[in-house]
Each structure stands twice: as C-alpha cells, then as structure tokens.
Image (tube, rainbow, N blue to C red):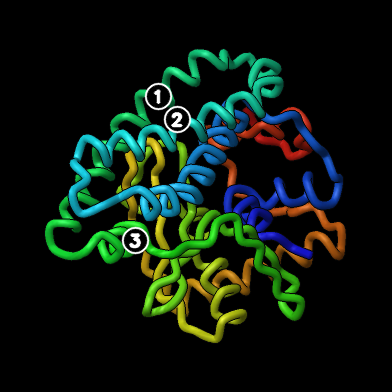
Amino acid sequence: MITVTDLCDYVWCPHLVYLKKVRRIKVPPTPAMVRGTVLHKVREDREARERIVLTNTLEESTSFSEIQSIIYSNGYQCAKNAVLKFRPRLEKAGIDPIELMSFLKQELKLESIVRAARIKRAMAATDVRTAIDLVLPDQRAEEMIEDGSLGLRGRIDKIDERRSGPVPVDYKTGAYHDEPTPGQQVQLAAYALLLERQRGHRVPFGIIEYTAIDRQVPVLIGDEQKEYVLALLDEVKRIVEQQEEPKEVEIKKEKCDACHYREHCTYDCGF
C-alpha cells in the first residue's frame, strides 16, 4: 500500500522513495522531526478537548478573561502531558524539555487570547452553543483513510465537518508560506481524493494550519490536482513494484543538503 507521505517524498525527490520503499533504509528522526511530533501532539490533543471543555463551562455571562483562562489551562495540560510522554525522545534528540515547555506556554498564551477573542465576538452575535459551533466546528482528528482499489492510504491531521462537506486540514509546525509548496499541494489533493471516494462528496479545497502562528490557509483543489495525484501514484507504484532506481532526478543542492537520507543516497549529486 502506498501512502500519501510516499507521494510527497516523490515530489521532493524520487530517489527518496527508492531508498525508503525499496531499500527500506531507516534513519533516526532529526531534532526538528521530534520537536514537530510533540507540537503536533499538543495541537491534536488540545483541539480534541477544547470544544468539550468550552461546551461544559461557558455561559452567556462568561467574560473574555475567563474564556482565555479556560482555553489556556486546557492547552497547558495537553502540552504538559505531551512533553512528559515524549521526554525520553526529546532528550535523546538533544532537546531540553523544560525549554520546549517554556516555548509552548508562551505560544499557548498568545493563541488562547486570539481564540478567546473569536469566541467572545461570536457570543455577542448569537447563543453560546452556536458561537462554539461557528468558531470550533465538529472535527475528527488523526483520521486514517484507505482506498483499496487505488492502493493508497493517508492519515489526515484533522477533518472539519462542515455543512458543505468534509475539509481536510494539515498541520504545519514550520515556517509560514503565502503559497503551498508542491508537496503540501499534493498532500491536500491526495486527502481530498481519498475523502471524495470514501464519502461521495466533492472536496474542492483543504486547509494548511500553521500551528506556530495559529493561521489557516485555504488551498483550492481542482480536478487537475487530483489527476496529478493519480499520476504520481502510478510512478511510485512503478518504483516499488519494479524495485527500480530512478534514473532522472532533479538535483538541487539545497534539497540534498537538507535531506536526512543523504549519507545513504547512491545518487551522484555532484557536490
């Protein structure tokens, strides 16, 4: 079974698919990967609990500062649990858990202010329950979707369940981009394709959520992008099934320098 991650790897470098899927080389996670895993876990757990916590505690008279405190306390507890759970991996990667927790507290404080303002503004226009629905729509986290006929599966960070249909959301802990990278575009298009085939509803867009700045960027997904995903899927299958090393690889020094598989790569980068 091919994964959406495999498609993104192919977009980055076809040789990466060969190293991971054919030669089955595994490398230890980089510090950035471990850090990203923890940040991802905090976001996932916080959002899974936040709607429930707010629904059970908010009243018409709840003040902005009280809402902000509720949101922050929930996020802080999720961060504390995640850092404790991943502490051995963090320390092995050379990351100080205390420093990471300090960073998370600052981020959660800022995010709680923004999120509380959104909810309080919505509460001024409607009732509490509707305000929560508007700001925090029903969602499903870490949803694994598999299509046997395609031979493709992917784990979606979050699915927003909207009246118009499901919207795939992908978390990013890295730097913000005005436009999605080719890999991000493929990732969301693949999720949209899987959701369409599973639900029978058209999925015309997805969302990239930059967790560091609590910003969502909508990404349009048309038929052309979904057809491109199918073409990529065929190419990845060919490499895996024929165990064929890609012969034509676009060489970019910045990509090779950043690749954590570089020392295992048999391709002559020329530098």
Q: Which residue is mark 3?
A: 218
Secondary structure beneath label 3: strand
Q: Which residue is mark 2?
A: 76
Q: Is residue 197 above or below residue 24?
A: below
Q: Is residue 211 above or below residue 198?
A: above
Q: CA distance from mark 2 to mark 3?
A: 28 Å
Q: Earlier in the sequence, mark 1 or mark 2?
A: 2
Residue under the point 77% across and 66% down:
237
Between marks 1 and 2, how big is the CA–CA gap? 7 Å
Comes first in the chain, label 2 or label 3: 2
Q: Residues within 10 Å of mark 2 (few under 14, many from 20)?
A: many
Disc 2 vs disc 3: which is toward the camera?
2
Residue at figure coordinates x 51%, y 35% from the top left: 78
The reply to whether dot 1 and dot 3 touch (C-beta < 8 Å) is no
Of the numbered discs 1 and 3, the one sitting upstream in the chain is 1
State whether residue 33 appears in this view.
yes
Residue at image coords 78%, 60%: 239
Task: Specify whether 245 is left or right of 258.
Answer: right
Residue farthest toward the left in the current orientation of the protein: 124
Q: Tag 2: residue type?
A: Tyr
Tag 3: amino acid: Pro
In the visual, does 205 lie left or right of 242? left
Badge 1: residue crowd in 10 Å (few <14, some 14–19, many ≥20): some
Residue located beneath label 1 in the image: 105
What x and y, as percent, mark residue 233?
A: 67, 68
Q: Nearer the viewer, residue 134 or 235?
A: 134
The residue tagged with tag 1: helix, strand or loop?
helix
Whether pointer 2 and pointer 3 mark residues with C-beta atoms closer than 8 Å, the reply is no
Q: Is residue 186 visible?
A: no
Tag 1 and tag 2, C-beta contact below 8 Å: yes
Q: Position of residue 23 (x, y in %)?
A: 86, 45
- Does residue 78 sit above or below 131 in this rendering? above
